[in-house]
């Protein structure tokens, strides 16, 4: 009886380990060919400087962040940024696959509001 019990325990443990591995893979899938060719760069700068602004109904601006130029589209509403879209991020004349987190976007918004006319 104990031999059968040990086999069942081993099978149950193996099933748990397999389930754990499948779940881990599901939450971290393999990288695509584009991600392998162009790894994602996290943008974080001490300071953001608005270099150029062109406004009609919606504004387009170039924001400088260290060696990166971030091209954005935004709209102002009573002195604050209503929305902001990142159009492109360029480094040394080439587009990069960039990630800009919420905190950095808040810093870009502050630079835009500070430089808005």
Image (cartoon, rainbow, N blue to C red):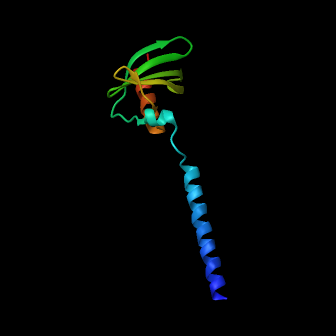
Q: Quadrant of the N terminus?
A: bottom right
Position of residue 37 measured from the top left corner of the image (x, y, whole percent): 44, 33
- Observer-nearest of 12 and 105: 12
Q: Is residue 100 visible?
A: no
Left or right position of 36 against 6 = left
- Residue at 55 percent of width and 16 percent of height: 58
Position of residue 53 measured from the top left corner of the image (x, y, whole percent): 44, 15
Left or right position of 92 against 70 = left
Please, is residue 21 above or below residue 31 in the view?
A: below
- Residue at 35 percent of width and 34 percent of height: 45
- Observer-nearest of 11 and 39: 11
- Residue at 63 percent of width and 85 percent of height: 3
- Write down the quadrant of residue 40 in the picture: top left
- Write down the quadrant of residue 9 in the picture: bottom right
Position of residue 94 measured from the top left corner of the image (x, y, whole percent): 39, 22
- Observer-nearest of 82 and 27: 27
Position of residue 107 measured from the top left corner of the image (x, y, whole percent): 42, 33
Please, is residue 52 above or below residue 23 in the view?
A: above
Left or right position of 2 against 104 = right
Q: Quadrant of the C terminus?
A: top left
Q: Is residue 64 visible?
A: yes
Please, is residue 106 above or below residue 12 in the view?
A: above
Q: How many marks?
A: 0
């Amino acid at each position: 009886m104990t031999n059968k019990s040990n086999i069942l325990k081993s099978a149950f443990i193996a099933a748990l380990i397999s389930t754990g591995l499948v779940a881990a893979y599901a939450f971290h899938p393999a990288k695509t060919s584009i991600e392998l060719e162009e790894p994602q760069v996290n943008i974080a700068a001490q300071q953001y400087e608005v270099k150029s602004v062109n406004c009609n109904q919606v504004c387009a601006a170039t924001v400088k962040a260290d060696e990166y130029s971030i091209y954005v589209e935004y709209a102002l509403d009573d002195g604050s940024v209503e929305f902001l879209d990142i159009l492109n991020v360029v480094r040394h004349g080439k587009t990069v696959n960039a990630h800009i987190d919420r905190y950095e976007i808040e810093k870009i918004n502050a630079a835009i509001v500070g430089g808005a006319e």
